Amino acid sequence: MQKKNATMDPRRSNDDAGSTLVEVIVAVLIMGTIAAGLLSMAAVSLIQSENQGHLAARTAEYAQDKMEQLLILSFGDDTSDTRVFPATPGGGVGIAAGGSANPAAPVVGYADYLDASGNLLTSNTATPPAGWFYQRVWQVTALSATLKEVRVTATVARSIGRQQKPTATLVSLKSFPF
């Protein structure tokens, strides 16, 4: 008895060798569903990376820069202008008690603004200057005659998506005579 080879079967036509249109449509729908799921995950990843990675890191960095600028001043300095870098002697409040750590309520002399690249913008009022992207506000509280608390909060003008804007707050103590 001779075995039949399926490829040599004369009853089988060339039309049976491929996929049907229905099979192709089902495969495309499955692939489209998978791609849509992956794209939404990529969008969430991009937003989180920008907000919690890039912007949050910059706010922390700029808050640290301001904290270092304030802590280098002498304990009794109440005239240095710390809204410029490096701080100039006179024209400011130094680390005199006052200010606000609330970005929504900046106090003149205790707030400064940076552009998107981190460059300091000049502002002598509580109104933000044009083109600002980062805001830094600070508050100095006299805890005793020899101890001050310095609180710096940095935030951004806007974030990506409907997320809360990244904010960084640092708190440090400054003691007399340093």
Image (spheres, rainbow, N blue to C red):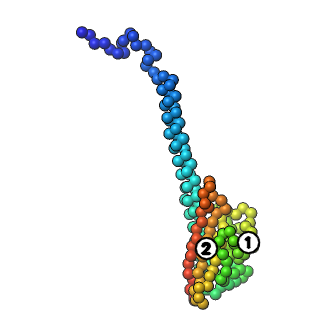
Q: Closer to the camera, 17 or 85?
A: 17
Task: Please name the residue shown 63% across and 66% down the image.
Answer: 155
* Residue ID for mark 2: 152
Which mark, by number, is residue 126?
1
Q: Earlier in the sequence, mark 1 or mark 2?
A: 1
Tell me if residue 162 comes above or below residue 71 in the rendering. above
Specify few, some or many for label 1: CA neighbours under 10 Å numbering under 14, 14-19, or 20 or more. Answer: some
Q: CA distance from mark 1 to mark 2?
A: 16 Å
Numbered mark located on residue 30 in the image: none
Say if mark 1 contacts mark 2, CB within 8 Å: no
User: Could you say where residue 143 lies in the image, as x and y percent from the top left?
Assistant: 59, 85
> Quadrant of the image for the C terminus?
bottom right
Q: What's the residue type where badge 2 is placed?
A: Val
Q: Give the secondary structure at mark 1.
A: loop
30 w.r.t. 69: above or below: above
Q: Is residue 120 visible?
A: no
> Which x, y percent locates residue 148?
59, 84
On the image, the x and y values in percent for residue 44 come to 55, 51
Q: Is 58 or 166 nearer to us in this picture? A: 166
Dot 1 amino acid type: Ala
Asked whether 85 or 178 is in front, the reply is 178
> From where the camera sits, is residue 146 visible?
yes
